[in-house]
Amino acid sequence: MIPLKNDTLIRALLRQPTAYTPVWLMRQAGRYLPEYNQTRARAGNFLALCKSPALATEVTLQPLDRYRLDAAILFSDILTIPDAMGLGLYFADGEGPRFERPTRDAASIGKLVAPDPLGELKYVIDAVAEIRRALGGRVPLIGFAGSPYTLACYMVEGGASDDFRTIKTMLYREPALLHRILEVNAQAVAAYLNAQIGAGVQAVMLFDTWGGNLSHDAYREFSLAYLARVLGEVKREHDGVRVPRIVFTKGGGLWLEAIAGCGCDCVGVDWTVNLADARQRVGERVSLQGNLDPAVLFSTPQVIREQTGKVLASFGPGPGHVFNLGHGISQFTPPDHVSALVAAVHELSRAHHEGR
Ligand code: CP3
């Protein structure tokens, strides 16, 4: 394997010294880039794009050709797992993801089986290998999966939801049913991440987009416990090299101490969190990733620079910060504003790492 030319991300995730703060963006390959929209049009639709390793490789590299980002993220989706379980994923125009066959009753839940990552999900694993070859060691490749709870939200609701009424009704009326879904999901996610690692991803991230909608106790029982279970099964090293793990619970700012203890190396935080405060709370246990409000990118290059400086200053000096947005980049972001952001992170962060 070719050694990494830029290992800043890996070092920062493991709280090792770096010359500057690395930066990548959640959803960095996406609809705000005209070249992405062109490739998606060639593929026909989003799912066809995900299922073509060649086209997934092309769009993974697009943001790296435009910006000096410190990581690539596999182009795919968290919902590939429930799709491979047979729930029938589709994207209705303007409505986000939907499932033809949501899983809500004991009969369908009893039949759920974790998919073989080298079977129905082989297209993802093939994409990982192809992206690694195309990257040629430029930057590390991040693999990912959804958290067992976040996947369950889509599987039970059948799509996005305002109030999560169906899954929360299940959680309080028939918790054993939800636990059964979460167990299958945890097995599926662990096997999927291990296959991604086997094919070459150099860090992994668990997206717990909806864990923040749970009560204090329910978060621990229905989301965090399964994140911990996944991480207990995921390989810590590949070919003798550490594979750092990031956990991001959107809306999880009140629970950072608990999240820091789930077996991850890095906790992702949304923009509601103050990084200085978060750093004090998690101590030496983990690094932090985040957390510029994605809406800052609608402003001006000057405001972007100021707001970036504030995020860097709030983390303060020393290693252990990976710069990112507090959630995915919006499709309405002007592409030039991302250049301003990346330049600001690289320039302004050097002062926080000097002499280290
Ligand atoms: O970050 C990257 O560049 C990698 C690719 C990536 C996508 N989805 C591509 C995508 C990643 C890491 C995801 C994760 C994902 N998918 C999450 C967790 C992160 C988060 O945003 O909270 C969730 C909840 C999903 C499920 C999903 N997929 C939703 C809700 C949507 C619709 C979103 C929207 O903006 O309409 C998708 C579709 C999707 N996944 C798109 C992309 C680029 C847009 C599809 C398109 O081209 O039309």
Image: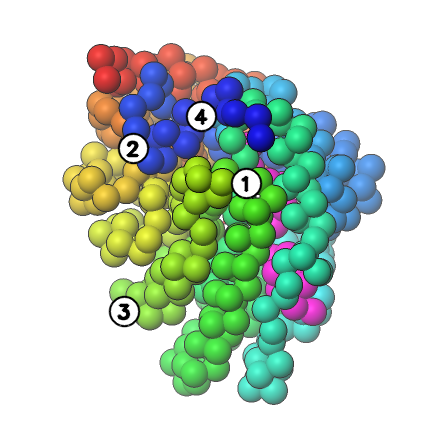
Q: CA distance from mark 2 to mark 1?
A: 19 Å
* 235 left or right of 156 in image: left
Which numbered disc covers residue 217? 3
Question: Residue 29 lies in magenta, yes or no?
Answer: no
The numbered dot on residue 105 is: none
Q: Which residue is mark 4?
A: 7
The percent position of residue 17, horizontal first and vertical second, equals: 29, 24
* Of callouts 2 and 1, the N-terminal one: 2
Question: What residue do we see at 60% from left, 76% from top?
Answer: 112
Indicate the amino acid at tag 3: Asp
Q: Residue at x 54, y 35 (%)?
A: 141
Decide: few, some or many residues near mark 1? Use Cα within 10 Å; few <14, some 14-19, many ≥20: many
Going by the numbered disc 2, the residue's amino acid type is Arg
**Neighbours of disc 3 within 10 Å: few (<14), some (14-19), many (20+):** few
Contact? badges 2 and 1 (CB < 8 Å): no
Q: Are marks 1 and 3 in contact (CB under 8 Å)?
A: no
Q: Mark 1: which amino acid?
A: Val
The residue pinned by badge 2 equals 15
